[in-house]
Image (tube, rainbow, N blue to C red):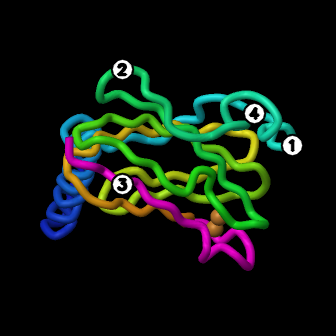
Amino acid sequence: MIHIDLYEKWWITLTIVVLVAFTVAIGMSAFVSGIQVPLPEARVNPNTVQQSGDFSSPGLKQLAPGKYEAHLLAQASPWKYYPAEIRVPVGSTVTFYVTSADVQHGFKIQSTNVNAMVLPGQVTKLTHTFDTVGEFSYECTEYCGVGHQNMFGKIIVEPK
Ligand code: CUA
C-alpha cells in the first residue's frame, strides 16, 4: 500500500467530492430544471433563406390551442429581428426556430432560459412555455456590427 500524506488524502477526497457534486449539478439542471442545450435543428442557405421556405415569411404560427411555433430571422444591416414583436396568450408553449441571414447573432429572451447563438446556415430550435402575463424582450447577445445594440424585439404574453 502506497503511503499518502494526511493532507494529500484530504485534497484527494475533496477533489472527488467536488467532481461528484458538479456531475450531480449537471444532471439536476438537465433533468430537474429542464435546462436545454440548443440543438442545430436544420441547415439553410443564408443567401436564399429570405426567398423561400419558413424564413421567407417569418412569424408566429398556431399549431394547436396553446401551441405555437415562431420562425425568426436575425439580420445585420439593418440590425433587426423579423418579426420584432410576437403576441401569445398566457400559458402558450412556443417553439422558436431562429436563423441568421448574414453574420453570427444571439437570441436571448429575458427572464427565461432561452439563450442561444444564431448562426448563418443553421437553424437553432428552443422551446419555452410562457406562464406569466407580461412583456419579455429578446435581444442579440453577440456583437454583430455597428447596429448590434438595436437588435431587439418583444414577446407580449396576453391574458386569456
Ligand atoms: Cu445581432 Cu448583435
For marks 2 and 4, the one nearer the N-term is: 4
What residue is at 65 percent from the left and 44 percent from the top? 99
Q: Does the magenta segment cover residue 157?
A: yes
Residue at which label 4 appears: 44
The front one of 62 and 74 is 62
Q: In which quarter of the image is residue 89?
A: top left
Question: Considering the numbered disc 4 on the image, is that residue within a helix, a strand or a loop?
Answer: loop
Residue at which label 2 appears: 64
What is the three-letter code of the residue carrying label 2?
Answer: Ala
Quadrant of the drawing holding the N terminus:
top left
**Furthest-front residue in this view:** 160
Query: Quick check: 76 above or below 130?
Result: below
For marks 3 and 1, the one nearer the N-term is: 1
Nearer the camera: disc 4 or disc 3 = 3
Q: Magenta segment range? A: 142-160
Residue 37 in view, yes or no: yes
- Rendered-image quarter of ligand 1: bottom right
Residue at which label 1 appears: 47
For marks 3 and 2, the one nearer the N-term is: 2
| Gap between marks 1 and 4 measured at Cα | 9 Å
Nearer the camera: disc 3 or disc 1 = 3
| Gap between marks 2 and 1 measured at Cα | 32 Å
**Furthest-top residue in this view:** 64
Q: Where residue 156 is drawn, which disc sits there?
A: 3
- Left or right of residue 51, residue 132 in this image: left
User: Marks 1 and 3: in contact by CB < 8 Å?
Assistant: no
